[in-house]
Image (cartoon, helix red, strand yellow):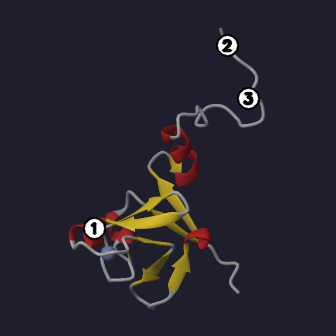
Amino acid sequence: MTDERRTIRLFDKEERNCYHCPRGHVAWFPIKDEFHCTRCTLNGEDVTRFDELTDSDTGETIARDDVELLTAFGPYREVSSMSLGGDGVYGTHSTPSEQDE
Ligand SMILES: [Zn+2]
């Protein structure tokens, strides 16, 4: 029951390092709706995806939904739409039928 959302600047290494995966690694990165840990992958863990980060200071877990991820280019979600093949960075989602020849 918290309406407090965390903002994590992904390009700020120190800020990223304040959070870790369930196994204590800081090699996490966001994927759609979840996080992924490259360290877990290298270790051959069965589960390399997780949906909450652990705060290194408090041991508190923070769900993906409660985290606002910022990249150097803006909020993570908006940037991610680019990798999905859309032009969401510049356009809006409201006029999908409008096309420039
Ligand atoms: Zn890990």
Farthest residue to the left: give it. Answer: 43
The kind of residue tagged 3 is Pro
Provide the residue designation for mark 2: 100
Does mark 1 have its CB less than 8 Å from ligand 1?
Answer: no
The furthest residue to the top? 101
In what element is the residue under mark 1? helix
Secondary structure, mark 2, is: loop
In the foreground, 37 or 67: 37
The 10 Å Cα crowd at callout 1, few under 14, some 14 to 19, many 20 or more, is: some
Q: CA distance from mark 3 to mark 2?
A: 11 Å
Between label 2 and label 1, give the one nearer the viewer. Answer: 1
> Could you tell me the amino acid type at mark 1?
Thr
Q: Residue at x 41, y 60 (%)?
A: 10
Seen from the viewer's position, the closer of residues 70 and 100 is 100
Labelled pair 2, 1 in contact (Cβ < 8 Å): no
Residue 91 vs 26, above or below: the answer is above
Q: Which residue is mark 3?
A: 96
Circle 2 residues within 10 Å: few <14, some 14–19, many ≥20: few
Distance between the alpha carbons at the discs numbered 2 and 1: 43 Å
Q: Quadrant of ligand 1?
A: bottom left
Of the numbered discs 3 and 1, the one sitting upstream in the chain is: 1
Residue 41 has which mark? 1
